[in-house]
Image: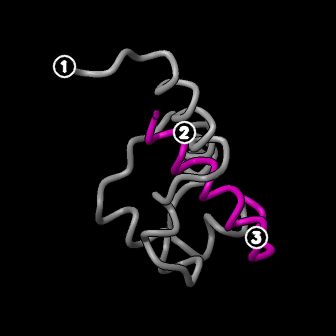
Amino acid sequence: MDMRRLVGRNFARLRREKGFTQEQFAEVSGMTQRYVSDLERGLRNPTVVTLFHLASALSVSPVDLVTPDEEARDESIKTSKGKSPKS
């Protein structure tokens, strides 16, 4: 599972649920719109401190940004079916 993509998907979903555009979120969080866009596309690898700031600006737990979503769970299932058991 690519954690950058997972965090980006979770962040984008939560941002939209809170009613923020990328530009509005950038303004209230102090981040650039470019950073927000790159984050959502899985091009950024945010630090733990950045995850905390993102979550705080969204009024969610940092855990909400790293919890596997349905797509990540599906990817995990597909990957595990293709692997042979360890001896």
Q: Which residue is mark 2?
A: 5
Name the disc covering residue 76, or none. none
Q: Few, some or many C-alpha atoms within 10 Å of disc 3 (few <14, some 14-19, many ≥20)?
A: some
Check the image and report above or below for 65 versus 33.
Answer: below
Residue visible at 51% across and 51% down?
Answer: 7
Q: Is residue 8 magenta?
A: yes
Q: Indicate the amino acid at tag 3.
A: Phe
Q: Few, some or many C-alpha atoms within 10 Å of disc 2 (few <14, some 14-19, many ≥20)?
A: some
Closest to the observer: 2 or 72? 72
Count of marks placed on residues: 3
Residue visible at 54% across and 80% down?
Answer: 60
Q: Quadrant of residue 6?
A: top right
Closest to the observer: 51 or 83? 83
Work out how far the residue at label 2 is from the one at label 3, CA to CA, in angstroms: 20 Å
- The percent position of residue 41, horizontal first and vertical second, equals 62, 37
Magenta segment boundaries in residue numbering: 1-22
Eye-nearest disc, 2 or 1: 1
Q: Which residue is mark 3?
A: 20
Mark 3 near mark 1, Cβ–Cβ under 8 Å?
no
Which quadrant is home to the C terminus? top left
Closest to the observer: 1 or 50? 1
Q: Which residue is mark 1?
A: 87
- The percent position of residue 54, horizontal first and vertical second, equals 49, 68
Q: Indicate the amino acid at tag 1.
A: Ser
Residue reaching furthest front?
A: 87
Q: Main secondary structure of the magenta part?
A: helix
Q: Secondary structure at mark 2?
A: helix
Sequence-earlier tag: 2 or 3: 2
Check the image and report above or below for 39 versus 13.
Answer: above
